[in-house]
Image (cartoon, rainbow, N blue to C red):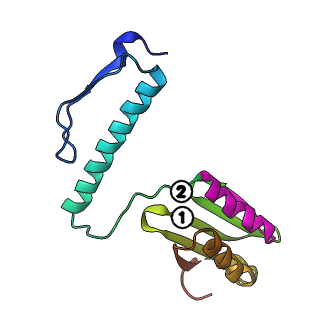
Amino acid sequence: MLTPQFTRFAATEDFMGSVRGLEAKTESLTPQLTIGLIYAINMYIVLYRYMGFLAKHGYSGELHLYWVRVSDLDKLVRRFRENGLCVGRHSYSYRLFYKGKVVAGLHLYPGYREASLRLYRVHRDLAEAVRELIIMVIRDVFPDYKIVVKWYPPGNP
């Protein structure tokens, strides 16, 4: 629980060249809202510094902030299960099982609008059997994502 002395904060960080010496009096806000506001400002500062770091070190690719709703992530799980695959999900990573064997790993990169599908060579015959099904389901739920398919481990079978 926050005490009254923590309901006033000041951020002196200069971000985006537009805010200097931001002070907010939050006496009328609830402690939870105050914490949320402080967290949002700090995350913005961290993101701005990270983007500056990337630019300073020569990164010129496009990175955007895209939020993916949890319902969309869960929708992908449901669609895989409806098509006979067992799925485990943690955050943006998925493990795909078919006939009791791990056949693939999937990781979503919302900032790049990319889905990285890693098919496992250990169960190559099962992975090949469901490869197109997996790609179809990803395109159904995330139609604007680029799908990168790789075999793991890399190299010849």
Q: Residue at x 28, y 56 (%)?
A: 51
Which picture quadrant has residue 134? Answer: bottom right
Q: Is residue 91 left or right of residue 134?
A: left
Which segment did they paint magenta?
70-88
State the separation of the CA atoms marked 1 and 2.
10 Å
Name the outermost residue toward the bottom.
156
Can the viewer see residue 127? no
Q: Which residue is mark 2?
A: 68
Q: Residue at x 49, y 70 (%)?
A: 114
Within 10 Å of disc 1 (Cα), the crowding (few <14, some 14-19, many 20+) is many
SS at circle 2: loop
25 or 109, nearer to the observer: 25
Residue 40, how many percent across, how many down? Answer: 38, 38
Instruction: Indicate which label's residue lies in the foreground, 1 or 2.
Output: 2
SS at circle 1: strand
138 or 107, nearer to the observer: 138
Query: How many numbered circles does the render carry?
Result: 2
Indicate yes or no whether the magenta region holds residue 119: no
Q: Amino acid at mark 1?
A: Leu
Residue 1, how many percent across, how many down? Answer: 49, 15
Name the outermost residue toward the top.
4
Judge whether 109 appears above or below 145 on screen: above
Q: Amino acid at mark 2?
A: Val
Which picture quadrant has residue 108? Answer: bottom right
Can the viewer see residue 110? yes
Q: Which residue is mark 1?
A: 108
98 or 156, nearer to the observer: 98
Mark 1–mark 2 CB contact (< 8 Å): yes
